[in-house]
Image: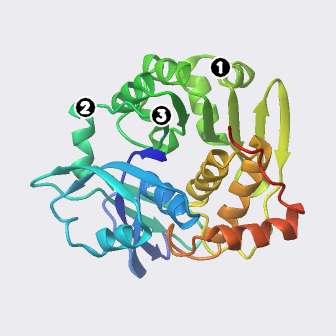
Amino acid sequence: MIHIVGHTAVDHISRVHHLPAANQSTHITDRQIFFGGGAANIAAGIAMLSEEVTLHSCVGNDFAGSDYEQWMKKLGIHRQFFEVPGTHTPTAFMFTDDAGSQMTFFEWGASKAFATAEAPSLPLVHMATADPDFNCRVAEKSEFVSFDPGQDVFWYTKEQLESIISNTDVLFANQHEVKQMCTTLGVTREALINEVSMAIFTMSGDGSTLYMNGMAHFIPVVPVTLSDPTGAGDAYRAGFLSAYVRGYTPLSCCRIGTVTASFVVEHVGCQTHLPTWEQMVERYQMHFGALEQPPLRG
């Protein structure tokens, strides 16, 4: 069982010709609503890849009976939710202009309950964006910890990052998050890598790199027609974790993560084009060759 901690959110994605300056307005040319939230995206990806997953998240009293709840039930996601009366399920409002620039407003809503919630003790957990202190407490109590700070990296203090990284086995981050973590911690990139058993740094369309045992392994992206990059990192982590619990080597896990992400970016929405394991394997073999069988588990 893979446990995922973090946000469940509803994404409102809008297109505008230009992002307005302060005290000005602009016209919305297109608006769509999607299921989102970093943790929920990862859980959905894992469920589509046929692995057992439990999502630990906060939702408002607008979640019960919603289309999002029905979607999670259909996927078979196990849920350990803090239901917070009188609040909204977290909501993201994203505006993208014709030049590709983006502005996001995020309503934490029910996720404020993370601050005072009791942290679970878990055998294998991935912590996505959530309350920094809550994630620190989960990391301290859990056996195997995977962590990505996401856009919440700016909310972590030096003490919180030191605490969580000291308990992290696998660290995921993009180039912007790596830079911010190094700034907050006052360390070099190499020093950050040496703090964990495995570090996986993604570089958008330039691929990703696995750092392990003093060596770096580059993984190229799978070329596809890009529609929307939102959710690619979450899909990568879903693929990696699903493969990891099946016993694949870390390098193969990264390649599987890359392939999983390639499906998501072909469509708008983080959960609208998630692959099955069989679809992932077919595309994997087209770009990386035969997918070796993992060692038998003891």
Amino acid found under the numbered disc labelled 1: Glu
Sequence-wise, the earlier of marks 1 and 3 is: 3
Query: Which of the labelled discs sits on residue 123, or is there none?
Result: 3
Say few, some or many: other residues with alpha carbon within 10 Å of mark 2 (under 14 / 14 to 19 / 20 or more).
few
- Between 140 and 155, the one nearer to me in the picture: 140
Amino acid found under the numbered disc labelled 3: Pro
Residue at point 88%, 62% (across, down): 290
Say few, some or many: other residues with alpha carbon within 10 Å of mark 3 (under 14 / 14 to 19 / 20 or more).
few
123 on left or right of 282: left
Give the residue at mark 2: 118
Task: Using the numbered discs, state the Cα–Cα distance from disc 1 to disc 3 in whole angstroms.
Answer: 21 Å
Residue 17, image x, y percentages:
50, 76
Residue 107, image x, y percentages:
28, 54
Instruction: Say if residue 19 shows up in the picture.
Output: no
Q: Secondary structure at mark 2?
A: loop
Give the residue at mark 1: 195
Query: Which of the labelled discs sits on residue 37, or is there none?
Result: none
